[in-house]
Amino acid sequence: MSGPDAAPPASPARRLNVRRGIVTSLVIAAACAVVALLGGLGLALFVGGGGCVLNVVGTLLAALTLNGAALRLHGARALVYFVLAMACLPLLEMRRESAEAAGQVLITALERYRALHGDYPKVVDMLQPELLAAIPPAYTTPLGREEFVYRHGRGAFFLIYDPVAVTPYIYDSTTGAWRLRD
């Protein structure tokens, strides 16, 4: 399209800056993905704040100002973060399954304690040493162990496993079932 209303072609320097921005976003997103695979923190970085949210806001602002280069840059960045966040969701489900299997050992130990003492312990450390030694962590990563949170009261207990601080997975002894927090 030519004429007075035609947009000038993007300069090579501007195209290079857009490419650099996309490559930088890819490198940051790849680093977050590695952290996600190792320790589960990447999903929180992707979804709970960090890159995806900031780039979606940047995309919206670029669209409002009709800045085409910024729109493409932030849109590409947001897309990269979104795709990587979606790729991490199966990891979250694997962690829940692992926590449920590990939690069953702890649930059995707590029920055994209740049968012997008439109530659940106030803290997990009150279990017999041999029972404590048999309890695996909720999930183990190369960065460390993720443990359950134990809550006790009124003849019942709850085990809480919260891998990314937004989706707690809870065992309720009154129902005998695991559930995601509503």
Image (cartoon, grey):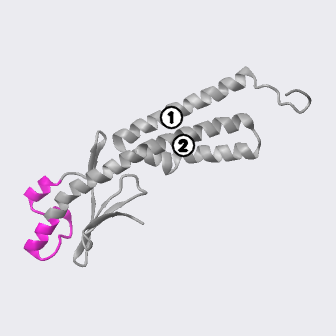
Residue 12 sits in quarter: top right
Q: Residue at x 64, y 48 (%)?
A: 57
Assign a secondary structure to mark 2.
Answer: helix
From which residue to which does the magenta span run?
A: 110-135
Q: According to the image, label 2 marks what residue?
A: 51
Q: Please identify the residue farthest to the right as the structure is shown.
A: 4
> Tag 2 or tag 1, which sits nearer the N-term?
1
Q: Is residue 139 above or below residue 149?
A: above
Query: Which label sits on residue 28?
Result: 1
Amino acid under disc 1: Ile
| Residue located farthest toward the bottom when viewing the structure as drawn | 154
Q: Residues within 10 Å of mark 1 (few under 14, many from 20)?
A: some
**Image point 66% across, 23% down: which residue?**
16
Residue 124 belongs to magenta span: yes
Q: Residues within 10 Å of mark 2 (few under 14, many from 20)?
A: many
Whether the magenta-drawn stretch holds residue 93 is answered as no
The reply to whether dot 1 and dot 2 touch (C-beta < 8 Å) is yes
Q: Position of residue 107 (x, y in %)?
A: 19, 63
Residue 21: quarter of image: top right
Q: Residue furthest top?
A: 12
The structure residue drawn at horizontal position 53% and vertical position 43%, both measured from the top left corner, is 82
- The answer to which quarter of the image holds residue 14 is top right
Percent across and percent down for residue 52 are 55, 45
Query: What's the residue type where badge 2 is placed?
Result: Gly
The quadrant of the rendering that contains the C terminus is bottom left
Image x and y of residue 26, in percent:
52, 32
Dominant SS in magenta: helix
Question: Foreground: 139 or 133?
Answer: 139
Outermost residue toward the front? 1
Instruction: Quote the CA–CA distance across marks 1 and 2.
Output: 9 Å
* SS of the residue under disc 1: helix
Q: Percent position (x, y) of residue 9? A: 79, 25
